[in-house]
Amino acid sequence: MKATIKDVAKEAGVSTGTVDRVINNKGSVAARTEKKVLEAIEKLNYTKSPIAKALVSRRKHIKIGITFPNLEYYFWNEVFKGIEEVKEKLEAFGVEIIVEPTKSYNIEEHIIAVDKLVKKEVKGIAMMSYDDKRCRKLIDKLVEKNIEVSTFISDSPNSKRLTFNGEDSIKAGNIAGKLMGLYLKGKGNIIIVGIHKILSCMQDRIQGFKSIVNEEFENIKIVDIIENKELANGKEEEYRKIIEKVIKKAIEDKNGIDGIYVTNSFTGSVGNLLEKHDYEKEIVLIGHENTDEIRDLIRKNIVKATVYQNQKEEIIRSIEILYERIAEGKKEYPNVQYIDLGILIKEKLTGTYK
Amino acid sequence: MKATIKDVAKEAGVSTGTVDRVINNKGSVAARTEKKVLEAIEKLNYTKSPIAKALVSRRKHIKIGITFPNLEYYFWNEVFKGIEEVKEKLEAFGVEIIVEPTKSYNIEEHIIAVDKLVKKEVKGIAMMSYDDKRCRKLIDKLVEKNIEVSTFISDSPNSKRLTFNGEDSIKAGNIAGKLMGLYLKGKGNIIIVGIHKILSCMQDRIQGFKSIVNEEFENIKIVDIIENKELANGKEEEYRKIIEKVIKKAIEDKNGIDGIYVTNSFTGSVGNLLEKHDYEKEIVLIGHENTDEIRDLIRKNIVKATVYQNQKEEIIRSIEILYERIAEGKKEYPNVQYIDLGILIKEKLTGTYK
DNA sequence: CTGTTAGCGCATTCAT
DNA sequence: ATGAATGCGCTAACAG
């Protein structure tokens, strides 16, 4: 049976209070006593029970805030699932989770949302951030006020946030590029659709995609890169219509497109477009993420493959890190924590072929 | 703040003991009282704290056993990592984990190992099982003796085990077949290497592989299927040598092999062979699993792709299910719990290309 | 500097 | 049939 704090106290000939002081570096322990306790811990191979600790920690009442742009419905839906999970888990630890989403990829709105969370006296904030000076300053100010910050999905690299939980976007682009090459059998003309170029992760995906294609597939040509200039504001459906219109034009302008690479979950939008118009030539559509909409399109063989991050795990880890830090004062975190990337193809989804 | 058993008791005007009796169906509660309690639970939206429950459950001392054939070193190494994780986690709940591996894929030895665990008075056993009559009987006997059983990696389908944690092997074969087709650009001659045909999951992988190849790639021909007749006993290194010899012969016999599909983690062995001999024609090697050895070979571009199950998660879930069942009497489990399959290619592993 | 004690939420035992 | 009391391992507040 695992040793408890009582066993350690007995072994060292002190009280549990003293052992607690040693374990948690609370000071006020004589050097000699501390040594005895440490020896006892070593001897009994003691580690503290996270269960019991959790029970106690209910007495504190910690608030943690979350903010992110709630556009790209299917994508963020997974994040909401993660929030529900982590909420339930941390509730047992006396933690309250406050969600304050924004309606756009707009930094002003983002700053306002963060402000609201601060007013509610959160001790930590998990946020989707931007590689932008204002965001860096925002985060650094929060940290000065003793509010811990972790980022997910999109980072603010040189800020004082604890850590970033997300994907290696260049690698994600690399994988997508390889898949494009394989499905095209190494040859064809393709276009890249890069929505939200404002996010540096989207630029990274494009960069990763291009380098693999250029390096490994000499007969594949990237004939155009389409970006959206205007930022979306609020209504996802309208935004999708704009995207569809632009892409439709691109396909018809460059005749003979063999493949389309979409840098984010709007892969779904482009897939719907292809399905509606049914161009005579089959177009290889490769994109990103793993949403209900995309899974449907993959099953129908309209989207060929996507590379996905596990955004649900990312938000969960972001919150857990904040809790660890706030409640337990954990110190060391890697600068970034990349989550494992997945590859989604039809055979992963369809009923098995016998 | 989340409601506790005390809040419920107060709301219903009874003691916590009575609430406890209602929650855990212990009987000896008047119908009228029970109703009051249930209403209070409803009103306060009460659910019990798993944390507190865990703390209490330390007072019981549950033993859980694990057995599996410890051959294919790299593969089982991941399982050992899973065991360490679950051990640490469940220790806090007062659970003792006892591991009793076998040295071969031999059913007699498997039965002996199970017997040893029974003698140590385990309340549950997680095992890699076989689709075999003797195993089915073995499991059913254990269940009669009130020892719970869950299977992982390989199942005993019609037995009385709680549930199976593993992969959908036909689907795994489907995915491998698709990858073979993509990497071969839809054409070539291939051989299948099926080690351990004794395991039905290996047969399923072959079946899944064949159906996709036949269905989707008319210019790919499966020219041979190599199986091992003899069972391994103990020494992995010797066993690997036998495999390598057989395959070397096959490659050289059928001249002009373009691809090899290996049904399990001996993909690593075959990869080492290809590296050593460096046949003039590049051979597309597709296989299974995600081990240190295989990742190395994928980085070197010798293995092109593998389909992997997460055997670490599988063992963890097998054990957790047993614990839930034994400690909390949870009743309902799906007959099988398929874990998500992963696809491993070079771009997932290498440093990112900029 | 050190020991004692109450209490986190729940399950169990002993009274009543 | 019900209530009260105890303890699981740990932390925090208080006493000395």
Image (cartoon, coloured by chain):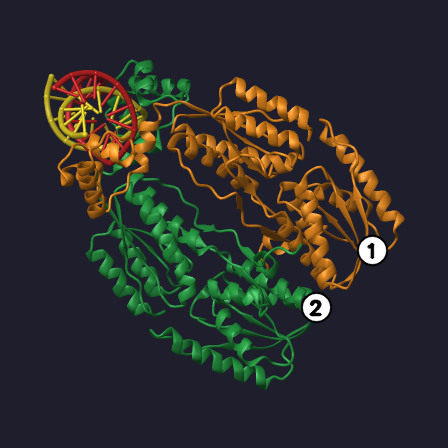
Chain colours: A green, B orange, C red, D yellow
> Looking at the rendering, in which quadrant would you find the N terminus of chain B?
top left
Residue A45 x %, y %: 42, 22
Please state which of residues A205 and A305 is positioned toward the viewer in this rendering.
Answer: A305
What is the C-alpha distance between the residues marked 2 and 1?
A: 19 Å
Q: Position of residue A55 (x, y in %)?
A: 27, 34
Kind of element beneath mark 2: loop
Q: Answer with the quarter of the image where residue A343 lies.
A: bottom right
Going by the numbered disc 1, the residue's amino acid type is: Lys
Task: List the residue tagged with mark 2.
Answer: A186
Q: What residue appears at the point 49 percent right and 19 percent down from the top-left corner?
A: B121
Q: Is residue B183 left or right of residue A76?
A: right
Image coords of residue B275 (percent x, y): 77, 46
Residue A314 x, y percent position in the rendering:
42, 52
Image vertical order of residue A234 relative to residue B8, above or below: below
Left-right relation of B284 to A90 = right
The three-letter code of the residue at mark 2 reads Gly
Query: Is residue B268 found left or right of A260 in the rendered image?
Result: right
Residue B321 appears anywhere in the view: yes
- Tell if the residue under mark 2 belongs to the same chain as the one under mark 1: no
Q: Residue furthest front?
A: B31
